Image (cartoon, helix red, strand yellow):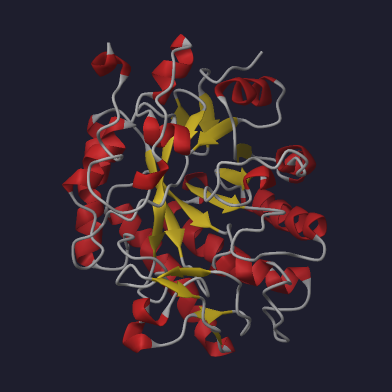
Amino acid sequence: MTTLFDSLKLGDLTLPNRLVMAPLTRMRSRQPGNIPHSLNATYYAQRATAGLIVSEATQVSQQGQGYPATPGIHTAEQTAGWRLVTDAVHQAGGRIFLQLWHVGRISHTSHQPDGGLPVAPSAITPSGGTFSADWKQVAFETPRALELDEIPGIVEDFRHGAQNAKDAGFDGVEVHGANGYLLDQFLQDGSNQRGDSYGGSIENRARLLLEIVDAAIEIWGAGRVGVRLSPFGTFNDMHDSDPIALFTYVLQQLSVRGVAYVHLIEPRSSAAGSMDKVIEDAPDTAQLFRQAFTGTLISAGGYTADSAKLAVADGQADAIAFGRLFIANPDLVERVRAGAALNAYDRATFYGGDKKGYTDYPSLAKSV
């Protein structure tokens, strides 16, 4: 029987265990230029016993930013800042992928170059709101639909980000195709109503994601590229008329490409961390799509230690990603292995701030 503590071949890497640290937006790159710094390095190094760390979502361009103090990977200064993080994680014996991100319509003019409108596949206003660059809550604006001749530039932004991630010392990259951000907006017909080669059919709507995955593979090789998806997810006002057909096609295409892994978010956590409530009657994404993808499957969303052990033992997933539990328990692997009590997380400190609720959670060694 497979356990969370068995090693796992993941693309070109061998992980020492199957507990993955999920990408977690923390909004703590507060120095000018959205540059990672020493506090971020400490945070990630504390969690280096994870089988794999996936970094917080990291914008590939200024246009791709949607929240204040989120890090980028499009300047030399940002790349150097991330090198502090990767060096610290590797010195602690860990492995870390960078998550490549463009938020699309989930932005605000205050984050955009020259104060322009956020971009999207179609000019459809999502419900809800976000934070402006000065940390004020604002309603979403109606985005500008990308012109066809602009789309190759988006692909190049991701390619440049993938190269910068390599220069920064990461072990690979994860393409963020989930949670209602730009690539997910192109995938789902609730947000993509284009009439050109990037809209309409499933094949057309999947085109941008797959072109970006191919660009990342050109930089890294397939064995060091992962993809995150959120079938049935509703975060950021997302929906699709036939998610099973859509994501089956996408997963089959990713199988053909031989990517290192696919990271699926369970819709029971469709609010993507904004609530503690778990939706009990949501579809089981890992089970629904297990046969569509032939590679390594990471499942995320509302797992406890016990449910994670069961999912891996039953073969529903090869590894389990934890978010909030890794926030509060830097030594989560050791605590789960020992059956020890877990620290409670403090939601009020999730976003923004300093070391409080970031690097000051105790490990077992410090709590006895």
Q: Is residue 9 above or below residue 341?
A: below
- Residue 36 locus on image (x, y percent): 24, 54
Where is residue 74, by image quadrant? bottom left
Q: Is residue 349 left or right of residue 272?
A: left
Q: What quarter of the picture does the C terminus occupy?
A: top left
- Residue 336 locus on image (x, y percent): 47, 18
Q: Is residue 182 left or right of residue 284?
A: left
Q: Is residue 57 left or right of residue 41?
A: right
User: Which residue is found at the position 44% from the left and 16% from the top?
Assistant: 341
User: Which residue is found at the position 71% from the left and 74% from the top?
Assistant: 204
Q: Is residue 103 above or below residue 53?
A: below
Where is residue 338, by image quadrant? top left
- Residue 61 locus on image (x, y percent): 37, 72
Q: Is residue 42 above or below residue 315?
A: below
**Which residue is more in the foreground, 106 or 150?**
106
Q: Is residue 175 above or below residue 344?
A: below
| Picture mark count | 0
User: Which residue is found at the position 47% from the left and 46% from the top?
Assistant: 224
**Which residue is more in the foreground, 65 or 361?**
361
**Which residue is more in the foreground, 43 or 234?**
234
Q: What quarter of the picture does the N terminus occupy?
A: top right
User: Which residue is found at the position 64% from the left and 71% from the top?
Assistant: 186
**Which residue is more in the foreground, 102 or 109?**
109
Q: Is residue 13 visible?
A: no
Q: Is residue 281 visible?
A: yes
- Residue 321 locus on image (x, y percent): 53, 36
